[in-house]
């Protein structure tokens, strides 16, 4: 009861703050025009006729402009001139790996999708399907080494290391390659050890990876192939879930399900619970359904597609599966509707001020199914002893150029804590890795 009361207190406080903000007559470009966290008891009524599309137009960062962090931090470019950097992973020796990949919809498909109300891809054309390596040995924020670590992939996203093996999750499978600590390029032949379902709605092509603490299990996030199962649930087998496999690809089981599009994953400090960031469904109005970060319990069901944010039944599937609706677990922290929260990293270093220690950074790629923008920033949720202790806070903003014109400079995706304690942020549409460090 204490945990649930704290959860409701956090969300109620955030709802109050957001409502106050929305009553202001003037708003900055980064203002989120709705509650970024919503008490589960005060969710608005779903409205399948209220869905609004507002696609962002990406423009170049001006020469004199960078994202803004709180007082006491400095923001710089760690790397740039890349095509669609999506995810960042730190190797055991401190090397920084960046997966370059994007949706492969053609320009014509994007136009059709926009007319039909689907989200357009941020980057058109063929994905470069490459992993880059950066090495910053003296930890001054300027990498001395940059190499092409691995090519020939198929929309890679997740990356992981176990002893002398490097794992990469393509959109259609988990691969393993021979690796030695310090390697700047993969030269050995890889092997596909798990087939994964590919294709689907709204860029749910990313497959993230997380290795268990004792390195005997690998967790794979797989997003849904549809918005709310409209193509039939027979097409959603092993999707909208986190899978668990052995390091050799055997022993697969569904660790948790009903997670519409889980992407970011990390281990919470102290509790060592698996946490994930989840993109929720579209089409129910500006303020439904809240995206969320949550601890993931083995065997748990989180609602998709039948229910959302607890046992709120989706009107488009009313009565379709009442038993699963009853089993739906309420996620831990709402982080705003349509924010496209993709990145998740707990701060386990000690370089940032104490308030950030153990907390969760969230890369919010930004909305498209909302009349006014939400997301387009890196947010932060404070934690203590592995549990959330306060409302969502802005951390890195300034990605929206002009909300009235739907113009943005960038869209944050993956986040990672570098060995020197800085926060690295992948801005995929501008091809930049931002570095946020203490002054």
Image: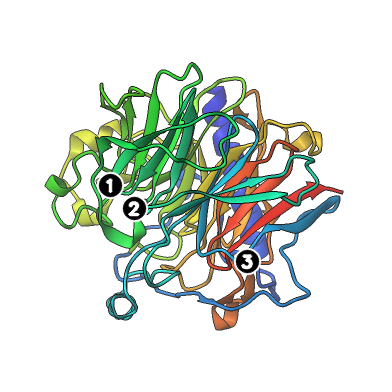
Query: What crowding class fits label 2: few (fewer than 14 Cα within 10 Å), some (14-19), or many (20 or more)?
Result: some
At which x and y percent is residue 224? Answer: 28, 49
Q: Is residue 346 above or below residue 32?
A: above
User: Residue 174, located in which quarter of the rendered image?
Assistant: top left
Query: What crowding class fits label 3: few (fewer than 14 Cα within 10 Å), some (14-19), or many (20 or more)?
Result: some
Which-is-in-front pick, marks 2 and 1?
A: 2
Q: Are marks 2 and 1 in contact (CB under 8 Å)?
A: yes
- Label 2: element kind: loop
Q: Which residue is mark 3?
A: 22
In the picture, measured across the screen, residue 132 lies left or right of residue 187, that is: right
Q: Which residue is mark 2?
A: 154
Counting residues from the start of the chain, the first of labels 1 and 3 encountered is 3
Which-is-in-front pick, marks 3 and 2?
A: 2
Residue 393 visible in rendering: no
At which x and y percent is residue 415? Answer: 59, 47
Query: Gap between marks 2 and 1, in whole Å?
Result: 7 Å
Q: Residue at point 25% right, 50% down?
A: 198
Q: Is 332 in front, or is 194?
A: 194
């Amino acid at each position: 009861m204490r945990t649930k009361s704290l959860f409701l207190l956090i969300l109620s406080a955030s709802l109050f703050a957001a409502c106050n903000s929305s009553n202001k007559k003037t708003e900055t470009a980064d203002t989120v025009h709705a509650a970024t966290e919503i008490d589960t008891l005060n969710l608005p009524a779903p409205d399948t006729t209220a869905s609004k599309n507002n696609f962002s137009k990406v423009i170049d960062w001006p020469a004199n402009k960078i994202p803004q962090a709180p007082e006491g931090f400095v923001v710089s470019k760690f790397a740039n001139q890349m095509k669609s950097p999506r995810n960042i992973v730190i190797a055991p020796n401190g090397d920084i790996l960046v997966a370059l990949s994007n949706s492969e919809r053609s320009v014509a498909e994007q136009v059709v999708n926009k007319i039909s109300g689907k989200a357009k891809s941020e980057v058109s054309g063929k994905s470069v399907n490459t992993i880059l390596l950066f090495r910053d040995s003296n930890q001054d924020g300027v990498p001395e080494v940059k190499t092409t670590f691995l090519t020939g992939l198929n929309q890679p996203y997740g990356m992981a290391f176990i002893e002398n093996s490097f794992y990469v999750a393509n959109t259609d499978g988990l691969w393993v390659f021979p690796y030695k600590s310090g390697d700047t390029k993969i030269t050995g032949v890889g092997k596909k050890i798990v087939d994964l379902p590919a294709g689907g709605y709204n860029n749910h092509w990313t497959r993230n990876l997380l290795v268990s603490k004792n390195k005997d299990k690998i967790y794979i996030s797989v997003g849904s192939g549809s918005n709310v199962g409209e193509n039939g649930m027979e097409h959603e087998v092993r999707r909208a879930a986190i899978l668990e496999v052995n390091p050799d690809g055997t022993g697969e089981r569904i660790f948790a399900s009903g997670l519409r599009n889980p992407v970011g994953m990390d281990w919470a400090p102290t509790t060592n619970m698996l946490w994930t960031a989840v993109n929720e469904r579209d089409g129910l109005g500006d303020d439904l359904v809240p995206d969320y970060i949550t601890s993931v319990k083995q065997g748990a069901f989180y609602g998709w597609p039948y229910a959302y944010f607890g046992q709120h039944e989706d009107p488009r599937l009313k009565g379709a599966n009442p038993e699963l609706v009853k089993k739906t677990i309420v996620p831990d922290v709402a982080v705003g509707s349509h924010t496209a929260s993709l990145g998740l990293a707990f701060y386990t270093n000690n370089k940032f001020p104490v308030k950030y220690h153990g907390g969760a950074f969230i890369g919010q790629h930004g909305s498209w199914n909302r009349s006014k923008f939400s997301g387009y920033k890196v947010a932060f949720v404070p934690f203590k002893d592995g549990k959330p202790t306060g409302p969502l806070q802005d951390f890195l903003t300034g990605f929206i150029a002009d909300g009235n014109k739907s113009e943005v400079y960038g869209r944050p995706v993956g986040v990672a804590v570098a060995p020197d304690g800085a926060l690295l942020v992948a801005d995929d549409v501008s091809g930049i890795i931002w570095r946020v460090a203490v002054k």
